[in-house]
Image: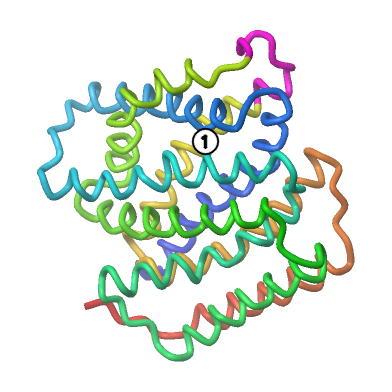
Amino acid sequence: MTKETKGMLIGFIGVAIFSLTLPLTRIVVQEITPFYVSFGRGVIAGVCGAILLLLSKSPLPTKTQFKKLLITAFGVVYGFPIFTSLAMQTLPSAHSGIVLGILPLATSAMGAIRFRERPSFAYWVTAVCGTLLVLVYSMMDAGGLALGDIWLLLAIVTVSMSYSEGGKLAQEMGAIKVISWAMAMTLPINIPAAFLFANTALTDLSANAFIAFLYLGLFSAFIGFFFWYRGIALGGVARVGQVQLLQPFLTLIGAYFLLGEPITVLNTVFAIAVLVVVLIGRRTSIEAK
């Protein structure tokens, strides 16, 4: 098995974990504020990260690594959680999952610009085709962009930077240390912010909302990145980023089982089309400088 193939398989596990983020966020924001969700999940992940760093006696990051960690934290700790939580107040998670389908192209573009990866023309064709497929689906399904869609676009811009930066940094520090430091170093902000935006005690949440909140903190904000950043470190930002084209459709399945949102014929047709594009893209060449 090549490093690229292994990276894509490991990255897919991370994508599968992340695919439940939107449905579970939608469950939670029905009971607590979007900012409480965002900062609260950061606290859970940050405590876990701090414990791991202490147990492993991890050395402090270098000055250069610290700067890269700040970029990583900007998107994964704040940008994506805040903007998606705001979007989930008004948008169905299935629709939102499709809008986020353009994230692979954004991640690939960031990686190509930031780290001089050189995807072939064929790669860009498949990435653009996959992105257009999910955008066309979104327009057909919802008939246009709402305010919630704008929040999602902002989430894409911020997290694509963090995905590419964190994935590359994982080659130096290891995936677990990257996300552990990113989450732990933001605890001084997240803890007071969570208290500031708290509108109810966690013990007053319904069982479903409480479990969803724990999942967001443990898996979406922490464990999922073990696999995602490790996958990128092995296979490269552009290549592994294409696996994200599958995430919208995994989200559709999650939304169906968790929220009862229907899976339609339109969903199925576009899911198959995107799978074909991913398989074709798997055969294209990408050169890393």
Give whichever of 114, 54 is nearer the camera.
114
Where is residue 279? Give x, y as percent. 58, 77
Image: 121 above or below 82? below
Question: Mark 1 — residue?
Answer: 219
The residue at 55%/83% (across/down) is: 126
Main SS of the magenta part reads: helix
Q: How many marks?
A: 1
Q: Is residue 10 left or right of residue 245?
A: left
Q: Among all residues in the image, which is located at the extreme front? A: 147
Element marked by disc 1: helix
The residue at 48%/90% (across/down) is: 122
Let me know if residue 265 is in the magenta part: no
Image: 145 above or below 177? below
Image: 148 above or below 188? below
Where is residue 171? Give x, y as percent. 24, 55
Image: 251 above or below 238? above
Where is residue 19? Give x, y as percent. 62, 49
Which span is picked out in magenta? 200-211
Quadrant where the C terminus is found in the figure: bottom left
The residue at 39%/55% (across/down) is: 163
Q: Among all residues in the image, which is located at the extreme bottom? A: 121
Three-letter residue code for mark 1: Phe
Give whichever of 48, 195 is nearer the camera.
195
Where is residue 246? Give x, y as percent. 62, 63
When asked about the image quadrant of residue 204, the answer is top right
Badge 1, how many Cα within 10 Å: few under 14, some, many 20+? many
Let me know if residue 209 is in the magenta part: yes
